Structures are given as structure tokens and as C-alpha cells.
Image (cartoon, rainbow, N blue to C red):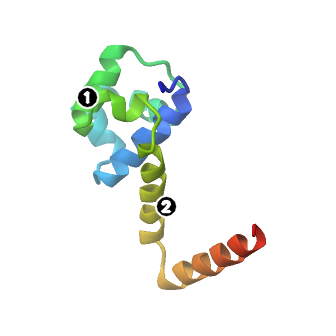
Amino acid sequence: MLIYDFQEIGNKLLSIRKRAGLTQSEVAEAANLSDRTYADIERGTVNMRIETILKICTALQITPDVILTEDNHSLSVKQQELLCKLEECTQKQKETALELLSVYLKSTQ
């Protein structure tokens, strides 16, 4: 299924960029876009032309279907995003996050 929500596309780009270890500036430069334009794209506040999508995909070394379609891949992107956020935490923060997750899961049973 195609995704038409630019914010969702921007979130996917953000996650992919972070997994690749790139900054917004690096992707913008590789895609021949201004830093501001690329930042707006990740925020989902800009309508992109096909040419722009293709430039960004080339810069990130992905195919357009990765960001323009919704499938089980989007779940793995969210899982990867969660892992990236956890990697940035201190050991104490990780322990707290695990405790909070356990409490939340118990409350939803």
C-alpha cells in the first residue's frame, strides 16, 4: 500500500538516516538539497517532487518503495528506531525503560 502522509515518509527517512549514521547535512549535500529543505522533508512539512524523492533515495542507498510503501518493514523500522534510542541511554536509563515497559505490558493484559 502506498503512503501519502508526508510526515510518515519523513519519519521513515529520519530513521533510515540515523541507522546509516548520517547527519541531515550529509544527506542534503548528497541529494543536492539545502539543509533546510531536507530538514523540512524529515518533518513532513514539504510536498516532494519525484525527482527529490529519487535524489534522497540515492543518497541513502535505498529504493523509493522503502519510504513510499507500507508493509511489515515499517514495524522493523520502528523497532530499529527504538533500539537506536536505547543505545543513546545510560545504563540506569535503560534499566528504568525496561521497568516502565514491564509495568505497561502488565497493565494491558
- Residue 57: mark in rendering: none
Q: Residue at x 35, y 35 (%)?
A: 66
- Which element is circle 2 on? helix
Q: Residue at x 22, y 38 (%)?
A: 61
Q: Is residue 42 above or below residue 37?
A: below
- Residue 31: mark in rendering: 1
Frontmost residue, 28 versus 107: 107
Q: Is residue 77 above or below residue 93?
A: above
Is residue 35 visible in the rendered image? The answer is no
The residue indicated by pointer 2 is: 82
Q: Alpha-carbon neighbours of circle 1 within 10 Å: few (<14), some, or many (≥20)?
A: some
37 to the left or right of 56:
right
Q: In the image, residue 71 lies at what x, y percent?
A: 45, 38
16 to the left or right of 7:
left
Q: In the image, residue 94 lies at what x, y percent?
A: 52, 79
- Which element is circle 1 on? loop
Q: In the image, residue 47 lies at what x, y percent?
A: 49, 18
- Along the polypeptide, which appears first: circle 2 or circle 1? 1
Q: CA distance from mark 2 to mark 1?
A: 26 Å
44 to the left or right of 16:
right
